[in-house]
Image (cartoon, rainbow, N blue to C red):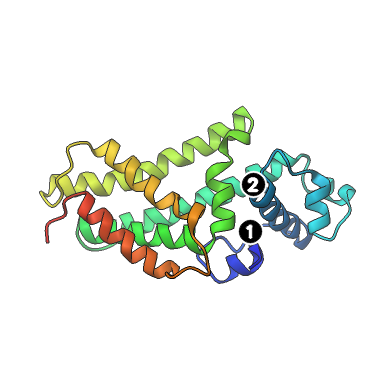
Amino acid sequence: MSTAEETAGAEMPPWAEVTPDAARRLLVAAVEAFAERGYHATTTRDIAGRAGMSPAALYIHYKTKEELLHRISRIGHEKALEILRTAAQGEGGAAERLADAVSSFVRWHAGGRTTARVVQYELDSLGPDARAEIIALRRQVDAEVRGIIQDGVAAGDFDVPDVPGTTLAVLSLCIDVARWFNVNGTRTPDEVGTLYADLVLRMVGARK
């Protein structure tokens, strides 16, 4: 399954915000190349070839290979933040909101695993300024999950002695799905999301 097909049928960004069409094609090609070969092993010629374009055409839309990675990473992290913020601001108690956050976040990583691997695991390939911007978005992602857990502790619904550590564990569990999920495996993204939501509620000692 290609990245274009993957993102069209999942909760990953459809890249509609990337225009014109040639810029979008190059970005999708970059995602596929970075996921398959790694950022450093991928050349601009590789990306342009996958997009059916010349290397010179790439530079019309992106000045550098890093600019492509930065845009992919920013859009991906903004989508991740949107998913978690929507869950955090939803109706219901902390347990319901945490389950929604985890299941949605896991589905995002499983359904769009190719893009998610690039978004989550190529941070160190960015330069200092771009990396700082993405780290700031990651802190906001962390804050959304931490806020739900803190709400649960304050309400007496969760038993969590270490909220920051537990937040890190929850996010790591969700993100790692992008690394191992197989579309030909025994579970769908929805099923993995439901499983992980239950596991996380057990992790925080949610009251039944």
Neighbours of disc 2 within 10 Å: few (<14), some (14-19), many (20+)? some
Residue type at mark 1: give it.
Glu
Q: Is residue 101 visible?
A: yes
| Residue at left offset 63%, top offset 60% | 15
Q: Position of residue 108 (x, y in %)?
A: 47, 60
| Residue at left offset 22%, top offset 36% | 162
Q: What kind of element bears circle 2?
A: helix
Task: For marks 1 and 2, give the CA distance.
Answer: 11 Å
Q: Position of residue 35 (x, y in %)?
A: 64, 51
Q: Position of residue 148 (x, y in %)?
A: 26, 49
Residue type at mark 2: give it.
Arg
**In the depicted structure, whether residue 156 falls above or below residue 97:** above
Neighbours of disc 1 within 10 Å: few (<14), some (14-19), many (20+)? few
Res 93 quadrant in image: bottom left
Q: What kind of element bears circle 1?
A: loop
Q: Which residue is mark 2?
A: 71
Residue 72 lies left or right of residue 151; in this view the side is right
Q: Which residue is mark 1?
A: 17
Q: Is residue 97 visible?
A: no
Given contact means CB atoms under 8 Å apart, are the residues at marks 1 and 2 in contact? no
Residue 153 lies left or right of residue 127; in this view the side is left
Most foreground residue, 143 or 8: 8
| Residue at left offset 67%, top offset 57% | 18
